[in-house]
Amino acid sequence: MLTFFRKRLFWQVYLTLLACLLLLALLVGALLHFTGESPEARWDAFRVRLTDELAKTQGLPHEGVRAAVRELSQDLGAAISVYGPDRVLIAAQGRPIPLSAGEDEVPQRWRDHVVRVDLPEGRIVLARLPPPEPGLRILTLVLLVAGGVGIAAYPATARLTRRLEQLRTGVESWGSGALARRVPEQGRDEVAMVAHSFNGAADRIEALVNSQKALLANASHELRSPLARLRMAIEIWSASPGAAREEITRNLAEIDQLVEEILLASRLDYAGASPLSGSQVDLLGLAAEEAARTGAGVDGTPVEIYGDATLLRRLMRNLLENAGKHGRPPVEITVSRAGDRVRIAVADRGPGISETERKRLFEPFYRPAGRSEMSGGWGLGLALVRQIAGRHHGTVRCETRDGGGSVFVVELPIAAS
């Protein structure tokens, strides 16, 4: 049973609250006990009040004394008896208090709560004090207040811990493999903020896992074509080694490039949340080098940005190779500056791309409608372009070129961010 209470967050919070209230009640009771009026002080104050008030009745007839005793008794809440010098009862309010014969000293009988006052003219006053307020009654009152607070706190504690339990259950379910599981975001407090943060992290991780699954599935599919061609080339090797060598070399290069792109895509996904490490990069210089390698034209103005030179080179290379493979010459790359951003544009004179397909061009292994496996798709080339641009806090898009063809535009911030 104790283990059950320890494991349940609600009982931990609620029982801790009740323990705090009980401790508070005990402390209040102890404080009242030690700071309250002591019996001796109460006794002396009562004696002084009796002496002062009844001394004023000296010389009054018995009726006047009785009236004064009646008023004083009501004021003090005590039973009072007044005896004359001859020890005869003069006035009494409440049950008369007997006067013991031959008793000359003031009795200190606290257990009877009786005080005796001898007035100068020989009169004797006996008064029974009302019992002091017991400490147990005060403690009981404090405990009742604490209990009321505990009962009132039950719904609030239950609501808070219920949300925490929902958060815990959701995290456990998500951790067991239900990546689509989300937790409710109720309220605007810290629990809601934790739930919001968890849902955001779960969205990103689910998207990353799904992306990796899709990447693996598409990569497996794309590897089949070069592997099949390799198998066929090996079979032809025995009959014509010279003709098969070129095919084997080409397919091995295709497989090597695909594996390299898969590794780069995975590395970019993994490093997406970490700060970008790099240096100042001359984009026009990179564009000129890559254009010379592919035979494309280059134009623009020198612009330097903070970034990863290897990744930016790969971005330009993929755009130029994509234009050379799927477009038509002339292919041109242009670097220009627009305010605080730099614009890299790769244009070709191919058949162009419809607006519907332009939205999906940057998906991994996207194959446009009407294209066969032999003609190939875009593989990971444009998907890597989007990842590299995003890594540099930039964007990429495809536009229609005036006069026919396509333009792939990358915009990157010049300053490091």
Image (cartoon, grey):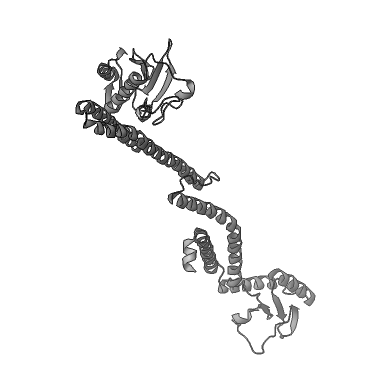
- Relative placement, left or right, of 350 versus 95 is left
Q: Is residue 304 above or below residue 221?
A: above
Tell which of 106 and 309 is nearer to you: 309
Q: Is residue 329 above or below residue 231?
A: above
- Relative placement, left or right, of 336 versus 70 is left
**Going by the picture, which residue comes out furthest to the bottom?**
102
Residue 282 picture location, percent across and down: 27, 20
Tell which of 173 and 14 is nearer to you: 173
- Relative placement, left or right, of 414 versus 148 is left
Q: Is residue 283 visible?
A: yes
Residue 287 picture location, percent across and down: 29, 18
- Determine the residue positioned at 57% across, 74% down: 39
Q: Is residue 244 above or below residue 102?
A: above
Position of the C terminus by quadrant: top left
Residue 193 picture location, percent across and down: 49, 44
- Determine the residue positioned at 39% across, 31% down: 365
**Going by the picture, which residue comes out furthest to the right?**
63
Residue 256 placement: quadrant: top left
- Determine the residue positioned at 49% across, 65% down: 4
Q: Is residue 301 visible?
A: no
Residue 402 picture location, percent across and down: 43, 11
Residue 117 placement: quadrant: bottom right
Tell which of 100 and 270 is nearer to you: 270
